C-alpha cells in the first residue's frame, strides 16, 4: 500500500497540493454541478452565440445551449472514460508485468518483445478502426438483450475498453521491473520454501508490494486516456453528438473561430477546463512518483 | 552484423504482415459496405461495382487477392474518390505530411536535447525548474488544445502568421511547433535524467580534471553517452508524430494524408484506409530498424544481438 511517508513527501510539494485541490474541485464541479443547474440549459434555445454574461457565464453555442453546462457534462464523460480506461489498463498491465517478471527467461523475453513492438506501432490508429468496427455490433447486441443504457452509451463503453487496451504498456514495464527485483527477496523464497503455489505467491505476496507504484502510475495513465479519448472525439470518431466530451467541445470551438468572426468562448472555456485537469493530473502524478521513488530525486 | 540485419528484416516483414491482416479483417467485419449511400443501388450495378473493386468472392479470396496485389505494390482503388487509386492519393498527400512531420521531428529532437542539457547543467536552479515546469506543461497539453489557441492568438488576434493552409515556410511554423512541443518535452525530461547521471561518471571527472571547459566536457564528452536514451525514444516519437499529425493537419487545414485518414474511416473507404495504415506502419517499422542500428553504432558497448 502507499506508504504514509510517501504521501507526506508529496504533501511538501506545493505544485502537487494545488493540483490535488484543483482536481477535487473539478471532479466535484463536473459530477455535482449539473445537478444544481436547470437541465433545460443543455437543450437548444433561442439565444444563439451569446457572449459570456451573468446569465450564461461561459456564453452559448450555435444551438443556444449554455456552454458552462456543456463543459461540465462533457467533463463527466471525459473523466469517466479517463478513470475507467485507466483501470482497464491497470488490470492488463499489472497482470502482464507480473507474469512476465515472475516467469522470467524466455516467456519474459517474448512478452516484453511484444510490448516493444506495440510501443512503436501507431496504436491509436487501430483503435480508430476498431471503434467503428465494433460499435454497431455492440449496439445490436445491447438492444437485443434489452440493455437500453448500453445502447445509448455504447461508444463510451467501447472507448473505455479499447483505450484501456492500448495504454497498459508502461504499466507492464514498470510492474515487471519491480517484480524482477522483488522475486529475489527473502519473503518470496520463504513462501516458495513453504510450498505455496505460484498463484498464491503472485497475488498474495508480490501484488500487495506493487500496489503503491501501481497507484502512482494510475494517476499518470488517467490523463493519457483522457487525451486519447478527446483525440478521437476531436476528429469526430469518438463521442457522438448530442453527447459531448471535452474533445468534441474543442472541435466545435476550433470550428467557431475564423478571421471574420471568432466565438472565442466556445474554444477558450473547454480548452481551459481540460488543460487545468490534465496539468493537475500530471503534476500530481509526477510529484507522487518522485516521492515514491526516492532514487529519481537528486 | 549481416545476420542481425537479416533477422531484423524478417521480423519487420512479419510485423507488417500482421498489421495488414488485422487491418483487412477489421475493415471487412465493419458493418455496412462502401457503397451504402443515400440512394439504394440496384443489385446488378452493386454486383458490378463489387467486381470492379474486387470485393466479391469469399473473405479468404478477397484477402489473398489483396495480399497478392499488395506484393505487386498496388494499393488498389479508393471506393469513395472514384477512379483515383490509393497510390495516387498517397503520392500527392504523403510529401506534405512528411514535410510537416520531418520539421516537427527536427524541432522536437534538437529543442528537447538542448533544453534537457541546460536543465541538467544547471541542476536545482531556476533554469532547471523553469525548463522542467515548461516540459510537464507541454506534455499535458495535446495539440488540439494548443493548436486552436495558437491560431486564435498568433493568427487571428496578432496576425503574425497564417491561420492555416499550405504554401510557404510561414505556413509551416505554427503546425510544426504545435506538433513538436509535447515530443520535445518528453525528450527534454529523458535528456535531463540521463545527463545528470552521465555527469557523475568517471570519464567526465577525468575530462574535468584535464582542465577542459565545462561546455566542452558537456557537449563533446558527456552528450555522446547521455543522448542514448533519447535515441531509443526516437521510434515511439515517430509513431507519436504520425498520429499527432492527423489532428494538426485537421486543425490547420493542411492538405496532408491525415485528413484522408479520418475520411477514409467515416466513408468506409477500406482500401484507402488499408493503404494508409500499411504505408504508415512500414515507415515506422523501417525507421525503428534504422534507429536500432544507429544505437548500436553510437554505443559500441552494446552488442546488437536483439
Image (cartoon, rainbow, N blue to C red):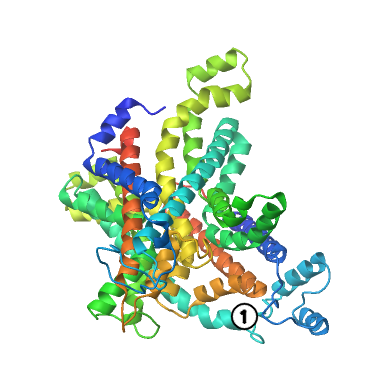
Image position of B21 (left or right of B58):
left
Is residue A141 depicted above or below B151 in this figure? above
Question: Split into 4 quadrants, where in the image is the C terminus of chain A?
Answer: top left
Is residue B140 depicted above or below A103 in this figure? below
Q: How many marks do you count on the picture? A: 1
Image position of A90 (left or right of B63):
left
Can the viewer see residue A184? yes
In front: B66, or A41?
A41
Query: Where is residue B305 shown, x and y percent of the image?
Result: 56, 48
Can the viewer see residue B294? no
Query: Where is residue A248 shown, x and y percent of the image?
Result: 45, 64
Location of mark 1 (residue): B87
Query: What chain is tagged by disc 1?
Result: B
The structure residue drawn at horizontal position 22% and vertical position 78%, both measured from the top left corner, is B158
Query: Where is residue A72 shown, x and y percent of the image?
Result: 38, 55
The image quadrant of residue B206 is top left
Is residue A202 depicted above or below B107 in this figure? above
The image quadrant of residue B260 is bottom right
The structure residue drawn at horizontal position 68% and vertical position 81%, both measured from the top left corner, is B77
In front: A20, or A152?
A152
The structure residue drawn at horizontal position 48% and vertical position 78%, both measured from the top left corner, is B256
In front: B149, or A187?
B149
The structure residue drawn at horizontal position 50% and vertical position 31%, both measured from the top left corner, is A180
Question: Split into 4 quadrants, where in the image is the N terminus of chain A?
Answer: top left
The image quadrant of residue A63 is bottom left
Query: Where is residue A270 shown, x and y percent of the image?
Result: 35, 62
In front: B124, or A86?
A86
Image position of A171 (left or right of A105):
left
Secondary structure beneath dot 1 equals helix
Q: Residue furthest top?
A: A194
Q: Within 10 Å of the Cα at label 1, are there few (<14), some (14-19), or many (20+) other Cα atoms?
A: some
Amino acid at each position: 500500500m502507499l506508504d504514509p511517508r510517501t504521501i507526506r513527501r508529496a504533501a511538501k510539494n506545493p505544485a502537487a497540493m494545488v493540483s490535488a485541490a484543483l482536481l477535487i474541485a473539478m471532479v466535484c464541479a463536473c459530477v455535482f454541478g449539473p445537478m444544481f443547474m436547470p437541465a433545460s440549459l443543455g437543450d437548444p434555445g433561442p439565444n444563439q452565440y451569446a457572449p459570456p454574461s451573468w446569465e450564461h457565464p461561459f456564453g452559448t453555442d450555435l444551438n443556444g445551449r449554455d456552454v458552462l453546462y456543456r463543459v461540465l457534462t462533457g467533463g463527466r464523460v471525459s473523466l469517466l472514460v479517463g478513470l475507467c480506461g485507466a483501470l482497464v489498463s491497470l488490470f492488463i498491465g499489472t497482470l502482464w508485468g507480473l507474469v512476465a517478471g515472475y516467469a522470467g527467461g524466455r516467456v519474459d523475453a517474448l512478452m516484453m518483445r511484444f510490448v516493444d513492438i506495440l510501443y512503436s506501432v501507431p496504436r491509436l490508429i487501430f483503435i480508430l478502426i476498431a471503434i467503428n468496427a465494433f460499435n454497431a455490433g455492440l449496439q445490436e447486441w445491447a438492444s437485443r438483450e434489452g440493455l437500453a443504457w448500453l445502447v445509448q452509451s455504447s461508444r463510451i463503453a467501447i472507448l473505455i475498453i479499447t483505450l484501456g487496451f492500448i495504454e497498459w504498456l508502461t504499466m507492464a514495464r514498470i510492474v515487471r521491473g519491480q517484480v524482477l527485483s522483488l522475486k529475489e527477496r527473502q519473503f518470496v523464497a520463504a513462501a516458495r520454501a513453504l510450498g505455496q503455489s505460484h498463484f498464491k505467491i503472485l497475488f498474495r505476496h508480490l501484488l500487495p508490494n506493487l500496489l503503491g507504484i501501481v497507484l502512482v502510475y494510475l494517476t499518470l495513465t488517467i490523463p493519457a486516456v483522457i487525451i486519447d479519448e478527446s483525440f478521437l472525439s476531436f476528429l469526430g470518431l469518438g463521442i457522438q453528438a448530442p453527447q459531448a466530451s471535452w474533445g468534441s467541445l474543442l472541435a466545435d470551438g476550433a470550428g467557431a473561430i475564423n478571421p471574420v468572426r471568432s466565438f472565442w468562448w466556445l474554444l477558450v472555456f473547454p480548452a481551459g477546463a481540460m488543460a487545468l485537469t490534465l496539468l493537475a493530473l500530471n503534476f500530481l502524478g509526477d510529484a507522487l512518483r518522485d516521492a515514491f521513488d526516492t532514487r529519481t530525486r537528486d | 552484423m549481416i545476420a542481425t540485419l537479416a533477422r531484423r528484416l524478417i521480423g519487420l516483414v512479419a510485423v507488417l504482415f500482421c498489421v495488414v491482416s488485422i487491418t483487412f479483417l477489421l475493415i471487412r467485419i465493419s458493418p455496412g459496405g462502401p457503397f451504402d449511400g443515400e440512394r439504394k443501388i440496384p443489385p446488378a450495378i452493386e454486383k458490378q461495382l463489387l467486381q470492379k473493386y474486387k470485393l466479391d468472392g469469399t473473405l479468404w479470396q478477397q484477402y489473398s487477392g489483396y495480399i497478392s496485389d499488395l506484393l505487386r505494390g498496388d494499393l488498389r482503388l479508393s471506393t469513395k474518390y472514384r477512379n483515383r487509386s490509393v497510390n495516387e492519393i498517397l503520392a500527392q498527400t504523403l510529401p506534405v505530411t512528411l514535410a510537416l512531420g520531418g520539421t516537427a521531428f527536427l524541432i522536437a529532437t534538437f529543442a528537447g536535447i538542448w533544453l534537457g542539457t541546460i536543465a541538467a547543467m544547471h541542476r536545482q536552479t531556476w533554469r532547471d525548474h523553469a525548463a522542467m515546469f515548461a516540459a510537464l506543461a507541454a506534455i499535458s497539453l495535446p495539440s488540439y488544445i494548443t493548436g486552436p489557441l495558437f491560431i486564435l492568438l498568433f493568427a487571428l488576434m496578432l496576425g503574425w502568421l497564417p491561420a492555416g493552409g499550405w504554401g510557404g515556410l510561414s505556413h509551416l511554423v505554427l503546425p510544426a511547433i504545435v506538433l513538436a512541443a509535447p515530443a520535445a518535452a518528453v525528450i527534454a525530461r529523458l535528456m535531463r535524467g540521463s545527463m545528470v547521471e552521465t555527469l557523475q561518471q568517471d570519464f567526465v571527472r577525468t575530462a574535468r580534471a584535464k582542465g577542459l571547459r565545462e561546455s566542452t566536457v558537456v557537449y563533446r564528452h558527456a552528450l555522446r553517452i547521455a543522448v542514448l536514451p533519447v535515441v531509443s525514444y526516437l521510434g515511439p516519437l515517430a509513431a507519436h508524430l504520425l498520429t499527432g499529425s492527423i489532428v494538426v493537419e485537421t486543425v490547420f487545414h493542411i492538405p496532408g494524408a491525415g485528413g484522408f485518414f479520418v475520411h477514409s474511416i467515416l466513408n468506409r473507404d477500406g482500401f484507402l484506409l488499408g493503404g494508409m495504415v500499411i504505408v504508415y506502419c512500414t515507415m515506422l517499422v523501417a525507421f525503428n530498424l534504422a534507429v536500432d542500428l544507429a544505437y548500436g553504432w553510437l554505443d559500441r558497448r552494446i552488442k546488437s544481438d536483439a
